[in-house]
Image (cartoon, grey):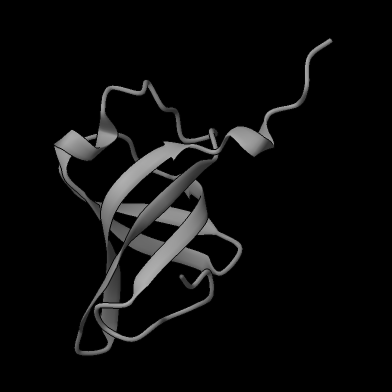
């Protein structure tokens, strides 16, 4: 699994960051430590999690590269739990 910049077509990648535009089918800007990466997210992947753009999420998907552009076809999207602070 890669968390760095552009990878080879059909590579499996995992990323932690923020989806800028929520929710719905189609491409969504995703910001992580490598910059802005387009994610292709189908409606069923959102799973009614009630996410907002300021909540960090972990995504898993496959690189879909065409010409010089690439996007990640997202398989799963979930709240990144380790970013929460412990409550006493």
Question: Where is 29 relative to 33, above or below?
Answer: above
Question: Where is 55 relative to 50, above or below?
Answer: below
Q: Nearer the viewer, residue 68 or 65?
A: 65
Which residue is pictured at 46% across the width and 35% down the height? 53
Q: Indicate left or right for 39 with 13 as reference.
A: left
Q: Nearer the viewer, residue 13 or 72?
A: 13
Q: Which quadrant holds residue 51?
A: top left
Q: Position of residue 65 (x, y in %)?
A: 23, 80
Q: Position of residue 16 (x, y in %)?
A: 53, 52
Which residue is pictured at 37% across the width and 20% down the height? 50
For this orientation, the residue located farthest to the top is 88
Which residue is pictured at 66% across the width and 37% down the height? 82
Q: Which quadrant holds residue 61?
A: bottom left
Q: Nearer the viewer, residue 27 or 8?
A: 8
For this orientation, the residue located farthest to the bottom is 67
Q: Indicate left or right for 10 with 50 as reference.
A: left
For this orientation, the residue located farthest to the right is 88
Q: Indicate left or right for 54 with 71 as reference.
A: right
Q: Position of residue 69 (x, y in %)?
A: 27, 80
Tally the marks.
0
Question: Where is 75 relative to 65, above or below?
Answer: above
Q: Position of residue 36 (x, y in %)?
A: 46, 63
Q: Which quadrant holds residue 44?
A: top left
Question: Where is 7 relative to 76, above or below?
Answer: below
Which residue is pictured at 46% across the width and 70% down the height? 1
Q: Quadrant of the C terminus?
A: top right
């Amino acid at each position: 699994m890669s968390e760095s910049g552009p990878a080879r077509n059909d590579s499996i990648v995992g990323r932690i960051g923020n989806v800028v535009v929520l929710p719905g089918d189609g491409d969504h800007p995703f910001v992580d430590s490598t910059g802005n990466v387009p994610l292709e997210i189908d409606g069923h992947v959102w799973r009614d999690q009630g996410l907002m753009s300021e909540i960090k999420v972990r995504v898993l998907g496959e690189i879909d590269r065409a010409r010089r552009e690439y996007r990640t076809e997202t398989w799963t999207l979930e709240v990144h739990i380790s970013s929460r602070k412990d409550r006493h």
